[in-house]
Image: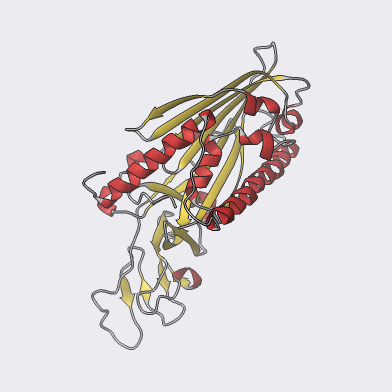
Amino acid sequence: MTQFARNQWYVAAYTTEVGDDLLGRTILGEPVVLYRSREDGRAIALADRCVHRRFPLSESRREGDSIMCGYHGFTYDRAGACVSVPGQTRVPRTARVASYPVVEQDSLVWIWVGDPAAADASRVPRAPHLVDPAMTTVRGMEPIDADYGLLVDNLLDLSHETYLHGGYIGTPEVAATPITTEVDEEAGVVRVSRHMADAECPPFYARSTGIEGRISRLQDIEYFAPCLYLLHSRITPVGRSAPVFRTEITYAITPSAPGKVYDFWAVSRDFAVGDEEVTAFLRDFNHTVVMQDVDALNLLQRALDTEPGPYQELSINIDTGALAARRILAALAAAGTGRADA
């Protein structure tokens, strides 16, 4: 299993998911309850377990900006301090739940479940296209019963599009075209590019852009470990410099628990921005593609779990980016433990 890097920012939800209702999520094995302050509109994140008998606060009820446990009535303010207990006026000094740093940026709610003193909001990676008024975005989230490292592998090696997503986004040229990889180990960034000068136009683009014939297709990936993945896609009819159809594919890869990951996905486009038919098509079409990945990764995890003993992986050139990401994730996890060899 890929070890968790705790002192890092992770996406817990879309901003539209956090409101009056209590939302339960599990981040790096930590149960979290999210809700929005009625006082100032800020997102609040607390540990999702009452200190009394561990009842989930996400299944309790709000009292203004406080949460009253639905089992015995222990009440917690927005900072996690218990302000009321049943049957007595004195509140035990240790009665409090953790409060987690939160940053809302680019329509994403980022959370820090590590050492609060180490949380630096300026280090949250950006995805400004998600809120760009010149683009239209469709989005969703799917939980996957697989190690989050498998999803990182999947997204950094897009050659699988040819085989797993044929008839949707994959064409023969994706697997046949060599990649270039750049790695900034210190910054924790991996960049993988695949430029196809003359490629078949897959249905994802043919039906959304109206292009007939072959295309120039550029795929430029930026992975900001551990959570944010951006695929900058540009397509143009072969032999022409315009029009250029720009699509930004975003994934937030948030480990939920060992062997479980949240797959936040979004597709932003700068063409047909007001066309509801195109929007509906891309939402449904991309959801199908995501579910193909979900099914494949669930199957892969079950296969790995039943391996009778140690096994040796075989890696080739297409794995360069994923292998670099594994090294970076291992270093981030080790740094979070305070080990001398990190």
Task: State how the image is colored.
Answer: secondary structure
Provide residue 184's location: percent of width, then percent of height: 37, 29
* Residue 71 rendering spot, x and y as whole percentages: 45, 81
Name the residue nearer the viewer: 274 or 249: 249
Q: Residue at x 51, y 33 (%)?
A: 319
Q: Residue at x 59, y 27 (%)?
A: 233
Left or right: 339, with 193 as reference point: left
Which residue is situated farthest in the right direction here?
212
Q: Is residue 262 above or below residue 188?
A: below
Q: Is residue 36 above or below residue 334?
A: below
Q: Nearer the viewer, residue 266 or 300?
A: 300
**Camera-side residue of 116 and 341:** 341
89 sits to left or right of 49: left
Where 184 sits versus 309, above or below? above
Residue 271 x/y as whole percent: 66, 28
Quadrant where the C terminus sits is top left
Residue sticking out furthest to the bottom: 87
Tell me: 283 left or right of 213. left
Residue 194 place in picture, x, y as percent: 56, 24
